[in-house]
Image: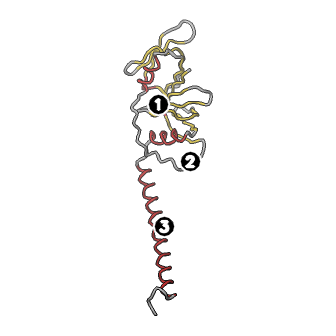
Amino acid sequence: MAGSFGSSGSLDSLDRLAAQLRVDDAARSRARRASLAGQAAEEATLRGVLVDLGERGTAVRLELVDGRATVGRVRHVGADLVTVHGAEGRESLVALAATACVVPQVGDDRVTGDRAVTSDLTMVEALGWLAGDRPRIQVRTRGGTTTGGELRSAGQDVAALLLDGRPRRLVHVAVATVVEVLVG
């Protein structure tokens, strides 16, 4: 009986149809993944990349505009800074505007950078918060200056440090020029 389910011709046709549908579904799935990856790449931000890497616990190398680099694990991403816990145990506050490249220490092509960042913590706010403990810090600026001392205060756009050495003078650093702050 031609056309009945019992005939081998009909089963072969159904098998071919099912195979074709699987191929079509797989192609649509690949196209959708590629489309979503493209959308994620178009929505990527530096802050989003850092959040992705921080959540994975991936060690990163931040290459900075002053030619130096900071290596460690991302701890926090704020409005204009990223905090990095270095291998030597020190915390670094790095200005996002001073970050030239982010290099994961382990290859990870799943980092998209399309993540939403909810923290609006700024460098000035972080320094103001730290100032209460009067930690010893080192500040590197875009001009290549490195200044070390006790963090005394942070105002709207300036941080005050009591310099190491003699005489112990108070120096004011324009926060907009900061590349990196090493704490401790």
* Type of amino acid under label 2: Asp
Q: Are marks 2 and 3 in contact (CB under 8 Å)?
A: no
Residue at horizontal 46 percent and vertical 93 percent from the top:
1
Which of these two is toward me, 129 or 122?
Answer: 129
Residue at horizontal 47 percent and vertical 30 percent from the top:
95
Q: Name the residue under label 1.
A: 95
* Type of amino acid under label 1: Ala
**Disc 2 element:** loop
Quick one: label 3 or label 1, which is nearer the N terminus? 3
Quick one: label 1 or label 2, which is nearer the N terminus? 1
Q: Where is residue 110 in the image (x, y as percent from the top left)?
A: 52, 50
Q: Name the residue under label 3.
A: 26
Residue at horizontal 42 percent and vertical 26 percent from the top:
176
Query: How many C-alpha atoms fall within 10 Å of the one at disc 2: few (<14), some, or many (≥20)?
Result: few
Query: How many C-alpha atoms fall within 10 Å of the one at disc 1: few (<14), some, or many (≥20)?
Result: many
Mark sitting on residue 108? 2
Quick one: label 2 or label 3, which is nearer the N terminus? 3
Residue at horizontal 47 percent and vertical 11 percent from the top:
170
